[in-house]
Image (cartoon, rainbow, N blue to C red):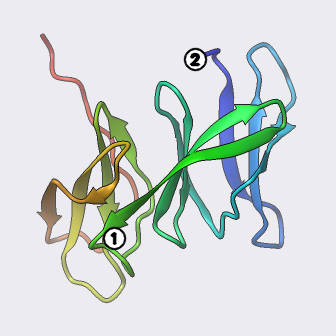
Amino acid sequence: DRGNLFVDGVNSGTTQTEFAELPKGSTSFTDITLDQKIHYPGAVQWDGKYIAFEDTFDDMVYRVKVAGSRGFAVKSLRFKGQRGDLLVQFWIAGSSILMPYGSFYRTIHSVGYWPYPAGGKSEKVVHVPDAAELYGVTLSVAPK
């Protein structure tokens, strides 16, 4: 809401999670220390109030409040019915969160819709039978 840029990833040569903010008008990133252990980062998106930060290893999304160089998880969301699948990237659309999922062992991959910020059981699933892997999703706004 202030025009800041948030990024996540892992540092060079390790699996140490990195989370940083580029404040509006700045030319350098500020490292943010999270109060939650992230095993492997995924998507990061502003949801209108908090930063939604994904741990792809644990199939979790955390709503994070940032204060200076610290990040505090105010809510954690688990997505039921998809454990063991690869949840890679998400898109928040109003009161839903959309995520592609599948695994190397499945022949059908899908996009699930879950309630946001509640998490829990998927509201809808769309199968993509010819996809080898799905990694991203976005939603276009219908013209008025």
Quadrant of the frame with the C terminus: top left
Displayed quadrant of residue 97: top left
Most extreme residue toward the bottom is: 105
The mark found on residue 7 in the picture is none
Reading the image, the residue beneath label 2 is 1
Quadrant of the frame with the N terminus: top right
Q: Is residue 117 above or below residue 16?
A: above
Q: Secondary structure at mark 2?
A: loop
**Image coords of residue 22 (percent x, y):** 76, 29
- 119 on left or right of 67: left
- Name the residue rendered at 76%, 54% in the picture: 18
**Image coords of residue 4 (percent x, y):** 68, 23
Mark positioned earlier in the residue sequence (1 or 2): 2
Q: Is residue 22 above or below residue 137?
A: above
- Name the residue rendered at 66%, 63% in the picture: 38
Q: Secondary structure at mark 1?
A: loop
The mark found on residue 133 in the picture is 1
Q: Residue type at mark 1: give it.
A: Glu
- 27 on left or right of 109: right
Q: Residue type at mark 2: give it.
A: Asp
Question: Mark 1 and mark 2: span between their CA atoms?
Answer: 33 Å
Choose mark 1 or mark 2, whichever is in front.
Answer: 2
**Image coords of residue 29 (percent x, y):** 83, 34
- Name the residue rendered at 81%, 73% in the picture: 14
- Name the residue rendered at 40%, 49% in the picture: 90
Displayed quadrant of residue 2: top right
